[in-house]
Amino acid sequence: MKEREIKFSDFFSKKEKRLEDSFIQQVYNIPGGESINKCIQCGVCTGSCPVSYTMDITPREIIALYRSEDIESILTSRTIWICASCYACTVRCPQGVQVTDIIYALKRLAMEQKIFPKRFPVHALSNTFVNLTNHFGRSYEPGLLVSYYLKTNPFKLLGMLPLFLKLISKGRIGLLPQKIRDKKGLSRILNEGQIMESIVPE
Amino acid sequence: MEYAYYPGCSLEASAKAYEESTRFVFDALGQKLVEIEDWNCCGATYYMATKETISLVISARNLALAEKYGNDIVAPCSSCYTILYKTNKILNDNFIMKEKVNQALKKDNLEYNLSLNVRHPLDVLVNDVGIDTIASRANTSLKGIKMAQYYGCQIVRPERGIDDKEDPQLMDRLFKALGAENVYFPAKVRCCGGMLMTTYPDVGLKLTKEILEHAQDNGAEVVVTTCPLCQMNLEAYQDKINKKFKTDLHIPVIYFTQALGLALGGSPKELGLNRQLIPFKPEEKTLEGSR
C-alpha cells in the first residue's frame, strides 16, 4: 500500500476535500492556472474590480480562503456571481494569477456541487442559457430573459415591457428563436462532450 | 482579403445594426466576409460558468467549421470574440483538452486542427486594411463630431496583443484620421456591468451611469462601442438611470462600424442607424457640408 503523506487538509471535512480536488483539477486546465500559488495577497485585484464594493468576499479573499481550505465559504458568498468577467483583475495582477478564469472555475464547481448563496439566484441565468443553446444551437435573448425572470422575480417582467416593445418596433427582437440546421449533429456532439466532461486525467 | 465571418446570435437580433454596418464597411473597403455555414452559439460566458469541456466543445464546433474558409475568423461581438479566442488558446495550450474536444466533434465528422486566428473586426480594419487606406477611401468627413471611444472590457482584456489593455488607441486613431474629435474619456475600458443589468440592476445601472457621465460631461455627442451588450446597456437604460440617480443623460450610443460607415458614404438606413433608441443624427450639421 502507498504510504500516505499527512496533509493539513486531512483535518477538514470530506466535502471540503472533494471541493478542493475538483477545483484544483479545473484551475490547472486554465492556461497559466498554476500561478494561483504565486498570489502575494497584495489586493490589486480587489482594487481594480469595479464591483468589489458590493461583494461579501473580495477577489483577494477568494484566494486566501482557498489557501485556508475553505472553498465552501467562497461558494456560499455572492462574489463569484457578481463578477461580470471584465478581466481588470487578471491583467493587473503582478503575479499573473488568472483571477477571472479562477472565478469561472468556481462557478462551475458551484454548479456541479449545487452550492449557492442564499437569495441570489444568478446562476439560474446560466442554466437557462445552456438549456436554450443545447436545444436550438443558438441563444435566444427574449426567451432567456423571460424564463430567468419567471424563475426569479416575475414582477420585473412587467417593468421590462416598455423596453421590449420599443426594441420590437426597431426590429431588434426576433419573435421566434433562430435554430441551427444540424440540430441532430449538435446533440450527438453534446452527448459525447458529456462523456468527455466526466473523464478526468490522472 | 477573405475572412470567415462569425456573426453570433446578438447580431441577428438586438444588434442587427452592428451586422448591417459591419457588412457595409467590409464591402466598401473591398474585404470579403464569408459567413460560416450553420454556425452555432459560442456559449457565451454562461456556458463557461456551467461546464468546462462541453463549453469548449460547443465553441470549437464553430472553429472546426471555419477552418475551411481560411486562416482568420472574425467575430464582432466582444463576448463571442472572447469565447472563441479563449477556446482557441486553451486547445492550443492543452493537448488533452484538444483531444477530448475533437473526440466529441468527431461524432458529427468535424475536427479542429488549430489553424485559426480569432480576430475582431476593429483589429482587422486597422491592422490589415490600415488607417491610411481607410482614410483614402473615405468620402465623408466626420469633422466636428465629438466622440467618446468606448472599448469595454473583453476586446482588449485579458491578453489580446492587439492594443493597450488600459488605454487602447485603435478606435481613437481611426476616427481621428477620419476627422472626428475624440473627447477625454478615462472610462474607455471600464466595465458596463454586462449581465448585471439583468441579475443585479442596482450595480449595473451605477456602472453604466458612471461611463455615460464621463462621456457626456466631457462634451461627447455620441458614444462609440464595439460590443452588443455594452451598446444595449449604455443606450437602453438611460431613462432608468435618470430616474434613479436624478441625472440628465441623453446621449446616443452607436457601433464603431456605424460611425466608420458614415465616413465611407453609407446612408443611415444602410448602417442600421434607424434602429437606434436614442437617434444619432450628425448629418444635419456636419456630414452634409463635407460631401
Image (cartoon, helix red, strand yellow):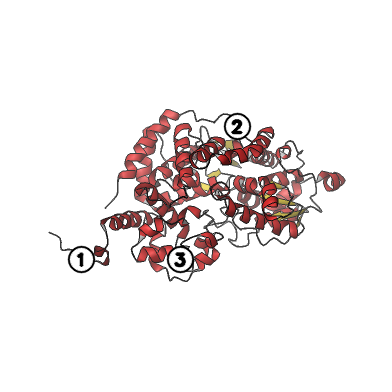
- Under mark 1, the amino acid is Glu
Identify the residue position indicated by label 1 in the image: A5
Question: Residue B33's spot in the image, x, y percent?
Answer: 60, 38
Q: Are marks 2 and 1 in contact (CB under 8 Å)?
A: no
Residue A170: quarter of image: top right
Question: In this picture, is B37 found above or below B228?
Answer: above
- Under mark 3, the amino acid is Arg
How would you rate the neighbour count of disc 3 (Cα within 10 Å): few for under 14, some for 14-19, many for 20 or more?
many
Question: Residue A20's spot in the image, x, y percent?
Answer: 32, 58
- Point out the tag, 3 or 1, that comes first from the N-terminus: 1
Question: Residue A183's spot in the image, x, y percent?
Answer: 45, 29
Question: In this picture, is B175 found above or below B37?
Answer: below
Q: Quadrant of the N terminus of chain A?
A: bottom left
Relative placement, left or right, of B132 versus B230 is right
Secondary structure under tag 3 reads helix
Identify the residue position indicated by label 2 in the image: A174
- In front here: B213 or B270? B213
- Point out the tag, 3 or 2, that comes first from the N-terminus: 3
Residue at horizontal 18 percent and vertical 63 percent from the top = A4
**CA gap, disc 2 to disc 1?**
59 Å
How would you rate the neighbour count of disc 1 (Cα within 10 Å): few for under 14, some for 14-19, many for 20 or more?
few
Q: Is residue A173 visible?
A: yes
